[in-house]
Amino acid sequence: MPGRGPTAVVTDLGILRPDPRSKELVLTEIYPGINVEDVIAKTGWLLRVSETLRVVDAPREDEIEMLRTFERRSAEAHGYLGADVSQ
């Protein structure tokens, strides 16, 4: 739906989901071996952490490949082909 926004943001450290009211991204899940302090330090804003933060399995290799394919297609569609879009 246009204007709805993301339902989740998947990173190499964990998963952020928008707060239902404020739409602020909130850290809701982290991967094994990741600590919250590292996630906060690597985030470019004052990150809110869910009171019910969960540790979830890290993405499988097929899921990572799917994300890379999506990133590549998105870059092509938006004219970023050849640019480093991983940062």
Image (tube, helix red, strand yellow):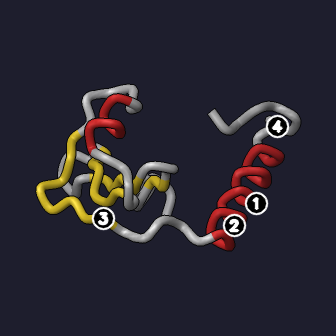
* Number of marks: 4
Give residue 34's position: percent from left, percent from top: 37, 50
Q: Are marks 3 and 2 in contact (CB under 8 Å)?
A: no
Q: Nearer the viewer, mark 4 or mark 2?
A: 2
Q: Are marks 1 and 2 in contact (CB under 8 Å)?
A: yes
* Numbered circle sitting on residue 66: 2
| Quadrant of the frame with the C terminus | top right
* Numbered circle sitting on residue 69: 1
| Near-viewer residue (54 or 34) | 34
Q: Are marks 4 and 2 in contact (CB under 8 Å)?
A: no
**Circle 1 crowding by C-alpha within 10 Å: few under 14, some 14–19, many from 20:** few
Tell me which label, 1 or 3, sits earlier in the chain.
Answer: 3
* Numbered circle sitting on residue 79: 4
Give residue 65's position: percent from left, percent from top: 72, 64
For badge 1, the amino acid type reads Thr
* Residue lying at 78% horizontally and 51% vertically, measured from the top left: 72
For badge 4, the amino acid type reads Gly
Q: Nearer the viewer, mark 4 or mark 1?
A: 1
* Separation of marks 1 and 3 at Cα, in angstroms: 26 Å
- Left or right: residue 32 versus residue 53 is right
* Separation of marks 4 and 1 at Cα, in angstroms: 15 Å
* Separation of marks 3 and 2 at Cα, in angstroms: 22 Å
* Residue lying at 21% horizontally and 41% vertically, measured from the top left: 48
* Residue lying at 49% horizontally and 50% vertically, measured from the top left: 11
Q: In this figure, which residue is indicated by the disc labeled 3?
A: 55
For badge 3, the amino acid type reads Val
* Separation of marks 4 and 2 at Cα, in angstroms: 20 Å
Tell me which label, 4 or 1, sits earlier in the chain.
Answer: 1
Tell me which label, 4 or 2, sits earlier in the chain.
Answer: 2
* Separation of marks 1 and 2 at Cα, in angstroms: 5 Å
